[in-house]
Image (cartoon, helix red, strand yellow):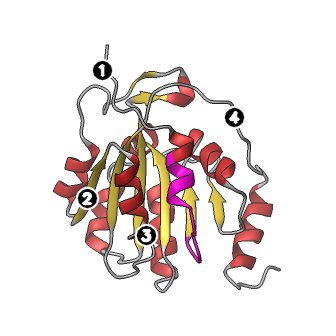
Amino acid sequence: MSEPIGTLDRRAAVKALLADRGDLLVISGLGSSSYDLFAAGEHPGNFYLWGAMGGAAMVGLGLALAQPKRPVLVITGDGEQLMGIGSLLTIAAKQPGNLSIAVLDNGQFGETGMQPSHSGLGAKLEVIASGAGIGSVSDIADMAGVEAFRARLRDVNGGPRLARIRIAAGELERALPPRDGTYLKNRFRGHLGIAVA
């Protein structure tokens, strides 16, 4: 059995990250991180990934490269990031200054029954990110750390950056954002000022 990773309330941590978000664009990973983002407040600059486990960081990378003057935040879970672990290598190679990744790490695969994830069995995502070449890496276990990370999210030159945020295990009531892919795509494009056909 794995030991608890952290004690932070996931919803409080995500809400704190998004306080005074300004022009921050946010991509959320599959499952709980999308519920957390939606619960923190619906916004046309939110893009919820549905059915694309492992892809959040790469979608964030593509967005950061396409919108270099806009800050981009990926909010994802440990299981989702572990599935897309190779994305950290590509992100480090591309060095997008405007990209931040917040990994909500409870050491469990929340969407499939709370089995221990690799981070729950000892893998340290912040060490993996650093080894991949991401220069700005944080291991956050308290709200002061969340606030310090939030203060850097609007910096479009200091990334890429990754924070492992140690959240408490446990299931919360789902807050379901829109699931219509066409609607989400068109809304997001409109928010970016891109014509929607």
Query: In the displayed structure, would residue 174 be above or below residue 74?
Result: above
Instruction: Indicate which disc residue 174 carries.
Output: 4
Residue at 51% over, 63% down: 59
Quadrant for the N terminus, please.
top left
| Mark closest to the chain's N terminus, 3 or 2 | 2
Residue at 80% over, 62% down: 183
**Residue 60 rendering spot, x and y as whole percentages:** 49, 65
Q: Secondary structure at mark 2?
A: strand
Query: In the displayed structure, would residue 97 be above or below residue 2?
Result: below
Q: Is residue 21 magenta?
A: yes
Instruction: Indicate which disc residue 3 carries.
Output: 1
The residues bearing labels 4 and 1 have C-alpha atoms spaced at a distance of 25 Å
- Amino acid beneath label 4: Arg
> Where does the magenta region start and end?
13-24
Query: In the displayed structure, would residue 107 be above or below residue 100?
Result: above
**Residue 176 rendering spot, x and y as whole percentages:** 74, 42
Q: Is residue 29 magenta?
A: no
Residue pushed farthest right?
197
| Mark closest to the chain's N terminus, 2 or 1 | 1
Instruction: Indicate which disc residue 137 carries.
Output: 2
Residue at 78% over, 62% down: 182
**Residue 154 rendering spot, x and y as whole percentages:** 45, 76
Residue 51, can we see it? Answer: no
- Amino acid beneath label 2: Val
**10 Å crowding of disc 1: few (<14), some (14-19), many (20+):** few
**10 Å crowding of disc 2: few (<14), some (14-19), many (20+):** many
